[in-house]
Image: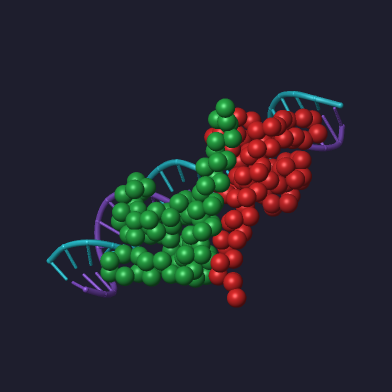
Chain colours: A green, B red, C cyan, D purple
Amino acid sequence: MSLAQIETFVAVVETGNVTRAADRLRIAQPALSRQIRGLEDELGTPLFARTSRGMTLLPEGERFLEHARRILDEVAAARRITSKR
Amino acid sequence: MSLAQIETFVAVVETGNVTRAADRLRIAQPALSRQIRGLEDELGTPLFARTSRGMTLLPEGERFLEHARRILDEVAAARRITSKR
DNA sequence: TCAAATTACGGTCGACGTAAGGATC
DNA sequence: GATCCTTACGTCGACCGTAATTTGA
């Protein structure tokens, strides 16, 4: 699991769509698609249902999302340890 | 910043020593040393003081450590979303 | 047939390990 | 001189982007 995968996951959740998530993160769709796939493989369960309109969260994805957001928040805070005051 | 760097950082804090941290994580010392250096470079501040006995945390390192532990805890929890019940 | 995701494929860049180098006691 | 950490250097694997393929409305 990588921070890039977690950021990607959240972007897909928020855009509902791999294409728009890729635009937002400025990387190509296939790279993003592979990151999601790799994450699901590692967890051993799908996080999204693929529809013809895009990706929608499954219950496992909802649970993962809670942790993902906390991780990204903590990472952002960790980056700021130096700029306090 | 990567999860590997964060894990490495915590291992160095807990062992007080790059050599023992490398043993614990089963990677070579230079790789571990580079991860710490890269982390410090990215943050723009040293996290450890280098002594002849090993590495001791600086105040910035103490602050980083709080976030690092929460990140690793959340990652562990995120990995477990699938094994609930 | 359009819009979406995925798979194939080749290239590049990062990160590793071994080995050598410094520094401190 | 022993015990740390760091720098040098060559190699290999992971990940990216372009292009082709697949799937569904």
Q: Is residue A55 above or below residue B19?
A: below
* Residue C1 shown left or right of residue C10 in the figure: left
Q: Quadrant of residue B16?
A: top right
Q: Is residue B1 visible?
A: no
Q: Nearer the viewer, residue C10 or C6?
A: C6
Q: Quadrant of residue B46?
A: top right
Query: At 51% from the left edge and 64% from the top edge, which residue is drawn?
Result: A63
Report x, y in % for residue C21.
69, 27
The count of marks equals 0
Report x, y in % for residue A15.
34, 56
Report x, y in % for residue C4.
28, 62
Query: At 43% from the left edge and 55% from the top edge, which residue is drawn?
Result: A10
Report x, y in % for residue A28.
33, 51
Q: Is residue B14 above or below residue A64?
A: above
* Residue A2 shown left or right of residue C9 in the figure: right
Q: Quadrant of residue D6?
A: top right
* Residue A43 shown left or right of residue D21 in the figure: right
Query: At 65% from the left edge and 49% from the top edge, which residue is drawn?
Result: B69
Location of the C terminus of chain A by quadrant is top right
Query: At 65% from the left edge and 37% from the top edge, which residue is drawn?
Result: B63
* Residue C8 shown left or right of residue B59 in the figure: left
